[in-house]
Image (cartoon, rainbow, N blue to C red):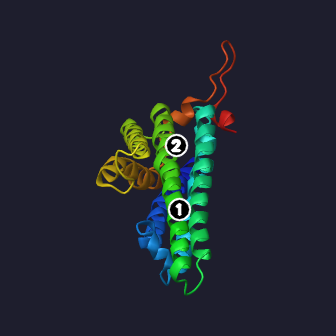
Amino acid sequence: MNSTRKTALAAGILFALTFITAIAGAIAYGPILTNARSILAAGAGTRVAWGTVFELLLVIANVGTALVLLPILTRHNEALALAYVVARVVEGLIIIVGALSLLSAVSLRPAGATGAEATSLLTTGRFLVAMHTGTSLLGPGLLGPGATGILLGWLLYRSGLVSRAMGCLGLIGGSLAVASGIAVLFGAYSLNSVWSGIATFPEVLWEGGVLSIWLIVKGFRAAPLTNELPAPSEGGPSRPLTAVAR
């Protein structure tokens, strides 16, 4: 297995991990994300702890995809490849802020809080849950599809590293998800609404399903990588491909 195939395999596994850890984190947080009062319930700390673990793994997988793909993507467009890495890093930082907000919410909750104290904690909890919702919108809701859908989709489409149809799916899915995120930002509908789910489904299909499976099973196309080998100078002897590769 050559280095390019290993890179594709590693990227595919990391993309699959982003999908798995994102779902696992949402399940772990459970009702806390939809009902802030759940922060006061027994077991909320454990739920948030597991959710935080999964979100940290999500951040590692997100940044890992960009770093693993960077050497190959820079051969085709260095500026966009670096932009992809930066976007993934910023997305990860936003996710961490959201996780910290929920950790703060449960750490402020003393055992047996009642009356005015419980009311004050509930107000604070609602604020911190709302902060997590906001980070989910700005990070995975806007920067995520903007990076993996639009930036990476365009890079793969132009370079021919995967099929053109694959690149188009990323561009379409990312554009729809970003447009949906903007609609949520301006109050057209909520982040957890049916409309948001419909709009983000192509991006989820692209990143968590089609792209990861393609990279794991097929890898990158070989032709675009050899096309960028330097051509022999005019009038001089041709260099063998093996020499160029070295």
Residue to which mark 1 is pinned: 127
Residue 127 percent location from the top left of the image: 53, 62
Question: Seen from this angle, which residue lies furthest bottom?
Answer: 112
Q: Nearer the viewer, mark 2 or mark 1?
A: 1
Query: Which amino acid type is shown beneath numbered disc 1?
Result: Phe
Residue under the point 49% across and 52% down: 140
**First in residue order: circle 2 vs circle 1:** 1
Total number of numbered discs in the rendering: 2
Residue under the point 56% across and 60% down: 98
16 or 175, which lies in front?
175
25 or 194, which lies in front?
194
Residue 32 percent location from the top left of the image: 45, 71
Residue under the point 58% across and 48% down: 88
122 or 240, which lies in front?
122
Question: Seen from this angle, which residue lies furthest top?
Answer: 235
Query: Which amino acid type is shown beneath numbered disc 2?
Result: Ala
Label 2, residues with CA under 10 Å away: few <14, some 14-19, many ≥20: many
Picture layout, residue 40 above or below residue 187: below
Residue under the point 53% across and 68% down: 125
| Residue 110 in sight in this render | yes
Spatial CA distance of label 2 from label 1 is 28 Å
| Residue 54 in sight in this render | no
Residue to which mark 2 is pinned: 147
Element type at marker 1? helix
Residue 54, by quadrant, is: bottom right
